Image (tube, rainbow, N blue to C red):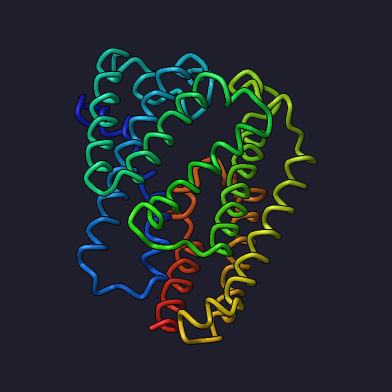
Amino acid sequence: MNRVADFVQLMRPHQWIKNVFVFTGFIFIHAWDDFALLQRVVMSAAGFCLMSSGIYILNDIVDREQDRRHPRKKNRPLAAGRVSVSAAGALGVFLTMASLGLAFRVSQATFLMLLAYGLMNVLYSFHLKHRVLLDVFVIAAGFMLRILVGTLGVGIPPSQWLVLCGIMITLFLGFSKRRAEIITMGEGESNHRSVLKHYSPVFLDQMIGITATGAIMSYSLYTMSPDTIRIHGTENLIYTVPIVIYGVFRYIYLLHHRHGGTDTAHDIVRDPWLVLTLVAWFGATLWLIT
């Protein structure tokens, strides 16, 4: 593998799909012809892509010894020794500075939230990822900041029900990730990630069930909210709820029967049924609110 490809792999561009959360507010605001607003949202998403890549590089630097004992992560450029720590660090600093520069051009609020995201993930890399439950809440907070950057950061008032749904779905994904790591690593899971010794399959399955239920219920209540009906001029968003339920259930199925859950972005793009579910939800939602 050539050096350029190794640096690209360090950035993990396939993970940028997670930053579609930044577009949540824009999709539901009925301002699709506002090019200036769209430009700010796109710049915010680009800033998150660069910042998240910088954080991934930091995590790979910190975790390179543990990654060498992981059946899949041992092939990452830093763990495999194909990229030096100094070169990776320089790339990470450049991406972080570029991210904050983009955020500052959008708004002060976007800059502060993206800075908070970066600092939170530095704490996560060095400390919080070893603290049971807090590790998952930090992952969820990262997704929530994406939603807030795409709403408050660009002047879009966020829906309280959508914010609650976002909290639940991101906690669901976080607990699913920990469950998948236990399944993947088996008896040696704590050698790779020490916090896993504090989790049990039964506990994680309970947390997954609670957060999955919360996500479905909060989204359902959002579709029936008087404010939602008033803004979108339709009561029919309720008919998208079965699509959301199927998507959640499909993800749980992949977790337990297809060794999914360790990489959300990978699971979404590689499973045709999840792709179809997302396309169906997006298409149905746009059709109903336009």
> Where is residue 39, by image quadrant?
bottom left
Q: Is residue 92 above or below residue 24?
A: above
At a point 27% along the width and 24% down the height, the residue shown is: 93
Q: In which quarter of the image is the C terminus?
A: bottom left
Task: Mark yes or no: residue 165 visible.
Answer: yes
Q: In this view, does 246 lie above or below 177?
A: below
Residue 133: percent from the left, percent from the top? Answer: 67, 34
Task: Mark yes or no: residue 189 visible.
Answer: no
**Residue sitting nearer the eye, 16 or 231:** 231
Q: Is residue 124 above or below residue 27?
A: above
Direction from residue 196 to residue 282 in the image, left or right = left
Q: In which quarter of the image is the N terminus?
A: top left
**Residue sitting nearer the eye, 12 or 211:** 211
Direction from residue 186 to residue 45 in the image, left or right = left
Q: Is residue 50 above or below residue 66?
A: below
Residue 289: percent from the left, percent from the top? Answer: 43, 81
Residue 70: percent from the left, percent from the top? Answer: 53, 24
**Residue sitting nearer the eye, 26 or 50:** 26
Residue 227: percent from the left, percent from the top? Answer: 54, 76
At a point 53% along the width and 82% down the height, the residue shown is: 229
| Count of marks placed on residues | 0
At a point 47% along the width and 61% down the height, the residue shown is: 158
